[in-house]
Image (tube, grey):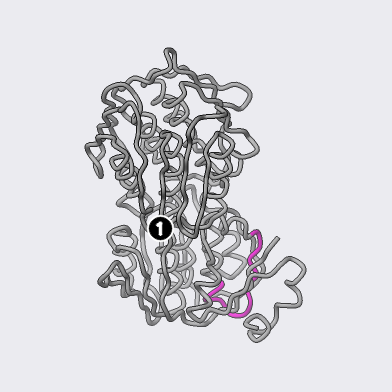
């Protein structure tokens, strides 16, 4: 078990490259199941969640080859209709193989998914939508058991009762090989869905309505191969923006367009941060003094992403006033509050509302990551805290951030990853950690 050791108080200064988006790469990899021709994805980060997806696709029948940031997925035939519990339990996005399996083979046996314990994320939208396309689905012994009478899905109209990103992605994937047209309404407009639609078009699928709540897909008999570059990771970018601001730093982010973070950027600008777009998909970030208080709530794109709520809370814990954060997406996404409180943050929670009173400074201590995004909120807090912070359970970070300690240390942060047995000898002074 690795731990992260951080000595706070050093302003970040430098350039941080932003990777391809994990949340875009996962459905794009699942898309590789729909064609017997190679799909080559570029700008794919090396992350635990993507490794899990590679393993799952290999079990189903894909041949996968990675060279650097390029991943080639070739699925000449489906060898297994099952997505087993031992793999799916590690990552909720594994359910994205359900739609492709039904579309290509007419059957699927997919374990109910796991992932971060941040709240109930029912799969009923996936199931109801696929039933609308003609699938027969039952839940048996913790598995989604699905069949398509006649072997071929049929296009239909389906309206999502609530916004569901993975639900929309599963339906889009399934509809691409269905007979006729599928019309999806109340579709999430997250940029990652647009990235998926772009790749589908490159593979020969006719799509209308990208970036709108109504998407029409003309099913086709077969998909061609394609080359597609994965979009930048807006959540990674937002995380580093928060890290630069909390340390009163000055950084440039590369390979990211500011339009992917509209509400997040506007809020931080209003609170006193300088965040400006530069040419060639770069963002300039700087801060002097304390960030001002904010009152903000999470919501689907273009609103504040729930995946940035924890990072924003860490930043506001040292703001110049009282802030309110309302979490509208997941009911259990305040688990980082107790760990931030161990560092001296003053946060009270009532239902889905957190009141954050800014303190003069945080104090380093030992904290434990509870989920993927909560883990980075603790790293952000540690960068600004007095003394040493030790963050444990780094496997959460590794699910979504590639080389976070390397990127931060190259901007001056005193941060180091150590093995469990090294923690006691490496902690204590800046010199020991930096060395």
Q: Residue at x 32, y 59 (%)?
A: 261
Q: Quadrant of residue 135?
A: top left
Furthest residue toward left: 208
| Residue 80 falls inside the magenta stretch | no
Q: Residue furthest top?
A: 150
According to the picture, the residue beneath numbered tag 1 turns out to be 233
Residue 413 lies left or right of residue 222; in this view the side is right
Q: Residue at x 41, y 59 (%)?
A: 324
Q: Which residues are magenta?
A: 382-393
Point out residue 121 in the picture as x, y percentages from the top left corner: 49, 38
Q: Secondary structure at mark 1?
A: loop
- Mark 1 crowd level (few <14, some 14–19, many ≥20, 10 Å Cα): many
Q: Position of residue 263 (x, y in %)?
A: 31, 58
Q: Position of residue 306 (x, y in %)?
A: 42, 52
In depth, the one of 119 and 184 nearer the eye is 184
Q: Is residue 76 above or below residue 102?
A: below
Asked if the stretch drawn in magenta spans residue 392, the answer is: yes
Indicate whether 147 appears above or below 21: above
Q: Quadrant of the C terminus?
A: bottom right
């Amino acid at each position: 078990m690795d731990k992260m050791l951080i000595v706070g108080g050093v302003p970040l200064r430098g350039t941080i490259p932003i990777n391809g988006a994990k949340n875009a790469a996962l459905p794009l990899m699942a898309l590789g199941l729909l064609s017997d021709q190679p799909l080559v994805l570029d700008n794919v980060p090396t992350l635990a969640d993507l490794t899990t997806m590679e393993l799952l696709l290999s079990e189903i029948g894909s041949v996968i080859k990675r060279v650097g940031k390029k991943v080639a997925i070739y699925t000449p035939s489906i060898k297994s209709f099952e997505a087993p519990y031992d793999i799916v339990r590690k990552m909720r996005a594994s359910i994205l193989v359900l739609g492709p399996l039904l579309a290509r083979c007419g059957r699927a046996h997919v374990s109910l998914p796991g992932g971060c314990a941040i709240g109930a994320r029912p799969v009923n939208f996936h199931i109801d939508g696929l039933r609308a396309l003609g699938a027969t689905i039952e839940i048996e012994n913790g598995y989604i058991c699905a069949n398509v009478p006649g072997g071929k899905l049929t296009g239909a109209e389906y309206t999502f009762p609530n916004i569901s990103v993975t639900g929309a992605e599963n339906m889009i994937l399934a509809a691409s090989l269905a007979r006729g047209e599928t019309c999806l309404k109340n579709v999430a407009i997250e940029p990652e869905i647009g990235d998926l639609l772009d790749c589908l078009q490159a593979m020969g699928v006719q799509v209308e309505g990208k970036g709108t709540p109504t998407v029409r897909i003309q099913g086709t008999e077969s998909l061609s191969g394609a080359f597609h570059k994965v979009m930048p990771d807006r959540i990674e970018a937002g995380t580093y923006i928060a890290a630069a601001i909390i340390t009163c730093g000055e950084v440039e982010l590369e390979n990211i367009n500011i339009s992917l973070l509209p509400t997040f950027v506007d809020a931080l600008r209003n609170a006193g941060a300088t965040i400006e777009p530069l040419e060639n998909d770069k963002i300039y970030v700087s801060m002097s003094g304390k960030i001002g208080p904010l009152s903000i709530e999470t919501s689907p794109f273009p609103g504040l992403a729930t995946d940035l709520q924890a990072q924003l809370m860490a930043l506001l814990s040292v703001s110049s006033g009282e802030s309110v954060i309302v979490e509208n997406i997941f009911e259990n996404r305040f688990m980082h509050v107790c760990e931030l409180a161990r560092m001296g943050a003053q946060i009270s929670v009532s239902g889905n509302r957190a009141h954050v009173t800014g303190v003069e400074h945080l104090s380093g201590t030992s904290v434990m990551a509870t989920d993927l995004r909560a883990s980075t909120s603790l790293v952000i807090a540690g960068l600004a805290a007095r003394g040493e912070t030790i963050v444990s359970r780094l496997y959460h970070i590794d699910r979504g951030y590639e080389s976070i300690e390397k990127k931060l240390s190259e901007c001056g942060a005193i941060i180091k990853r150590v093995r469990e047995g090294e923690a006691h000898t490496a902690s204590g002074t800046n010199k020991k950690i930096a060395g």
